[in-house]
Structure formats: C-alpha cells, structure tokens
Amino acid sequence: MALVMALGMTVVLGMAGTTAMVYSTSNSTQAYQTRSRGNAFSLAESGINNSMAILDLPTNNALDPDTLPKCTSNNTKYSDPTATHTSTSTWLHATYSGGSVDYCGTLIRASALWYLTSIGNTHNPNKASGTVTRTLEATVTVTPTVTQPLNNPVWNYLYAGNTGSACDQTLNNNISGSSRMYIAGNLCLSPNVQLNQSTVIVGGNLDLSNNASVGASTSLSTRVETYVGGNCRYGGAAWAACSGNQDARNIYSKLSDGVTTSVNHVAPVVAPPAADFATWYENAIPGPSQTCTSSSGTPPTFDGNYPNHDNSVSTPVDLTPSSSYFCRVGPGANTTLAGAMTSSQTTLTVASATGFPSSQFTIRVDDESMLVTGGFGTTTWTVTRGANGSTSAAHLSGQTLVWNTATSGVIGWNATTKTLTISGTIYIDGSAKVSNGSLNSYNGQGTLYLSGTFHVTGSLCATISASACNFAGWNPDFDLFMVVANGSGGQNNPSDSIQIDNNFSWQGGLYGTNAVEFGNNVSVDGPIVGSQILLSNNLTTNSFPTITYVPVGMPSNDEVYAQPNPPQGFTG
C-alpha cells in the first residue's frame, strides 16, 4: 500500500513539475519573442531617423526623389496600397548589434511629400535561422526655400569681372545715373566719356582719354565716390598712384564722408560671383530633372534630352509669347481676376476657385497680398487688403492671382496683362528671350538659369508707373527676377551672354558668363555681372536699393534647397 501511494505521489509531482517547467519555458519564449519584436520596432525607428538625417543634410535637396532609394510598387503600400514588402534589395541598409534595418522613401513632388518606409530585422528566438521584422511607415512634408539672405555684396553693383588686360573694361559712351559700379581689373574711358555714378570702384588702373572724366567738379553732389587700387593717368600722360586729390586728371572724387575731395587708394575687394550651372541643372524646379507637376497653356521647354547637360533646347524659349501659360512644381493654385479691383474694395471675383483651400488663405495679385476670409468654394471671395505688410492697390481685370503657398517653383505668363510670375530656381537647357516689344511686368522672386543666352526686345519691370518702370518704387527684397546665362553669340552679338536692345528698360538682375551688352537709350535698374559690360549711347543706370534678400540660386550664394519637417502619420 505504501509503495503504491509513493509511486502515485511521485507521478503527480512529476506531472506538476513538468507542467511548471513547460509553463515557465512558454513564458520565457513569449518574453524573448516580445523583446525581439520590441528590438525590431526600435530598429525600424532607427531607419526613419536615418532617412530624416539624409533629408536634413544641407547639401541634399529634400525635393530630389533620388535623395533616398525609391520604395517601388512591389515593396511598399505607399506606391501601391495592395502591395506587400517583397524586396528590399535597392533600399538603404544598416547593421547594428541587435539586428539590421532596411529603409527607403518615395517623393510625391506635386504634394512636396515623402512617404518613408523602414523594416527592422532581429533574430527570432524560436528559430535557429529565423527573423522577427517590424515595419514602420511615416510621412514627411517638405517646405521649399525660395529666398535667402544675400551673402555676397557683388549683387549691389554693376560688376565687370575681367582682369589681366590693359583695358579689362572700356567705356566708349557716357553713363549717367546713380548705380554703384565695380571694375575688378583696369578701367579705360574713351575720349569725351563722362562717368557719373554714385560710387565707382576700380581694382586696377584707371586710364582716362582726352576730355573723359569721372564725375564733375561743379559741387560735392556731382562728385563721385571713387576708389582706385592701382595707378591713374589722363590723356596718355605719366601714370601716378591714384590717391588724394585727382582733379588734375579729371577724376572728380569725394570720400565716403561726402566732404573730402580725394580718391580712396584702398579699393574694397568684392569676390567675383560663381554660377554653378551643373548643380542647378539637376536641382532647379521646374527644370530638366522635374518639369511642371501642374500646368496650363504651353509652358517653356526645359530640356531636350535629360540628363545630358548640353544646351539641347535648340530654339530660344519666348518667356512672353502671345498666349498665356502657367507651370508649377508643388502644391498651390492660380486663377485670374474676373473683374478689375479698386484699391479699397473688399470682395473680388475669380475665374475659378479650383484648387484653393476651404478655410482662410493668402493670395497675391501684383505686389499686393490679401487674406481671403469668406466665399470659400465659390468664385466670389471676401478679402482683407494689404496683408503681410503689402500695400493695397488697384488691379486689372484678368490679372494673375496665386495662392501664397510654399510652392517649389513657378513660372507663368499672363498674355492679357503682360505679367510674368516667377518663384524659385528655374533651368532651361538652352536660350530664352523677351521678344514682344512691350512694357511687361513681373511678380515674385526667382532665378532663371540658361545654358545658352538671353535676349531682350521689350521692357521688363518689377513695378510700373505711368507706362514706364517705376525706378523709385522698386523693392528688390520683394520682387527680383535674376537671369543667369552661360552662352554667347547665337541670338546675340558675338561674345554676348545677354543683350538688351535699343530703347528698352530692365529692372532686375543679370549675370553673364561672357559679356552683357546694352543698346542705345537703355535704362537699367538692378545688379549686373558680366565679364564685360558693353554700353551703347545714353545708358541710364538707376540707384536700386541695397539688397538683403535674394531668390535661391543667385550665383555665389549658398545652395539652399528645401527643409523637411518632422515625420508624422506613423503606422506599423
């Protein structure tokens, strides 16, 4: 009896022990499994963080779809909602002590939005060669950068950059006006040339022919603040160090104090600008790598055979044709006014409300911003005038109206009101022109890069008053169209990157790798940079304000693209 009882108790205790052991092992396995899933999730988070670190690099363009490997349709639901993650062979991969992570990103440029996917991988404790994976997905909006602080003072001058010749810059005709002029090398004035500017800086020598002069001795107000780093002479006489009073050599100068009649012999050094055509060929929006995500009419042709950077657009693009066009990359909307506006009315009618928000938003018409406070979804809106520090003004029927959102890039032409709308950095792998012979205006801040040349047969103004450019009222920190041209000849005279024909006006910035030439009776207002500045009769330069903010893409400014916002909308 005792033996039977002992055996029974032994069996019962054995069963209990076995049950306890199995239960303990199961709990331990579950704990390991939970820990592995947690580790895999942490690894997936690291993949999102790695993606953000790449997008955040200042040298990377967060609006370039090649910044991260694309999550193709066979491996992420963001490209195809029914797809599964079947391949990560092209994704970025990182290995850590607890496992590894694979990650990728898909950019929807029309929405300026990244879809990020990350898969964390760690060892499966239940299988000798198994893996526990966790997938984490997130969205990242991108805010384009379209303006930046000026970091090179060259853009406050008419700048001729040639050096190394006896006459790096020759002026054959009178120049009147009040712009600041900078000659990096030697300046020669032909006979009878009168140079009247607010400031003239010559890095090398100043050579005046008979009856040529800088400024006038009439009064202090007619004298020109002059800097000459080298020597000067008049009428072929002996060279002399150009300092002190140089009235005897027809250099009627004053110092910056405004009262001392003297030439300053210490010429400020302003670094020559450099245009990075290769970088902006790839990163301009719109441009060769990314044409319009929304458009109307016939926008410019940006490239003929991307990615070959070879001046492939054979016919110069007319920026001001007979019909309207509009091109945008990124979110936003545009329409036109269906009726003229006075400077005081608080309602307006538009041709279409398609694409505009259903709550308060800001619009821009000409140089005025307005806050739309009512009428959402209809074509009649209630507005608050003069928003964002702008000034209320009258506007023509048919004028372009844009939603002031952070678009990546815009170029548009309103043939009815003869208004060009620009924003961001734009690239045409060829030449461009203004050819309608009219008085045209533009709104916005933008830089246009050209592999070829630029030719102007017509006036282009940031602001217009009394059928002419409003030279006194221009604020380049608010409106500045910058043209950067790399070619020469072709539609222009030989050696010219940029040519402006007789009797027209230009208000904006110009950069030519080669010469910039102006015809007779031309008025210019804005910074000009070229190897040489070729001037015909009666050029008038206007004293544009000191520039502090410029459109992204200005040569010699830091290359700034776009900033990603913190990730959101996590799933997984």
Image (cartoon, grey):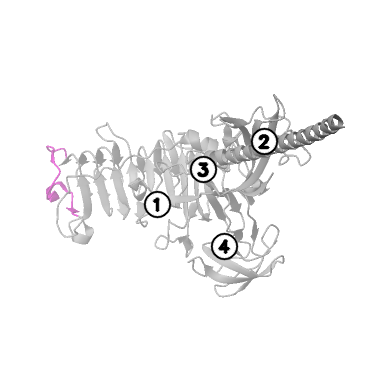
- Residue flagged by tag 1: what amino acid is it? Gly
In space, the residues marked 4 and 3 are separated at their CA atoms by 33 Å
Q: Position of residue 482 (x, y in %)?
A: 46, 47
Q: Is residue 433 visible?
A: yes
Q: How many numbered marks are there?
A: 4
Query: Which residue lies under the disc numbered 3?
Result: 56
Please state the horizontal and vertical placement of residue 58, each as a whole percent of the image.
47, 41
Disc number for residue 526 = 1
Residue under label 2, please give it.
32
Q: What secondary structure is found at the residue carrying circle 4? A: strand
Q: Where is the C terminus found, in terms of image quarters?
A: top right
Q: Mark 4 or mark 2: which comes first in sequence?
A: 2
| Residue under the point 27% across and 55% down | 198
Mark 1 residue element? loop
Label 2: which secondary element: helix
Give yes or no for residue 124 being in the magenta stretch.
no
The residues colored magenta run: 235-255
Instruction: Check the image and name the residue furthest to the top.
Output: 129
Closer mark to the observer between disc 3 and disc 2 = 2
> Tags 4 and 2 in contact by the CB under 8 Å rule?
no
* Badge number at residue 161: none
Q: Nearer the viewer, residue 172 or 27?
A: 27
* Residue mark closest to the camera, 4 vs 1: 4
Residue 234's x, y, as percent?
A: 16, 42
Q: Earlier in the sequence, mark 3 or mark 2?
A: 2
Q: Is residue 340 left or right of residue 532?
A: right
Disc 1 residue crowd, few under 14, some 14–19, many 20+, Cα 10 Å: many
Q: Which residue is mark 4?
A: 365
Q: Earlier in the sequence, mark 1 or mark 3?
A: 3
Nearest-to-viewer mark from 2 and 1? 2
Kindly report the secondary structure that dominates the magenta region of the rendered protein: loop
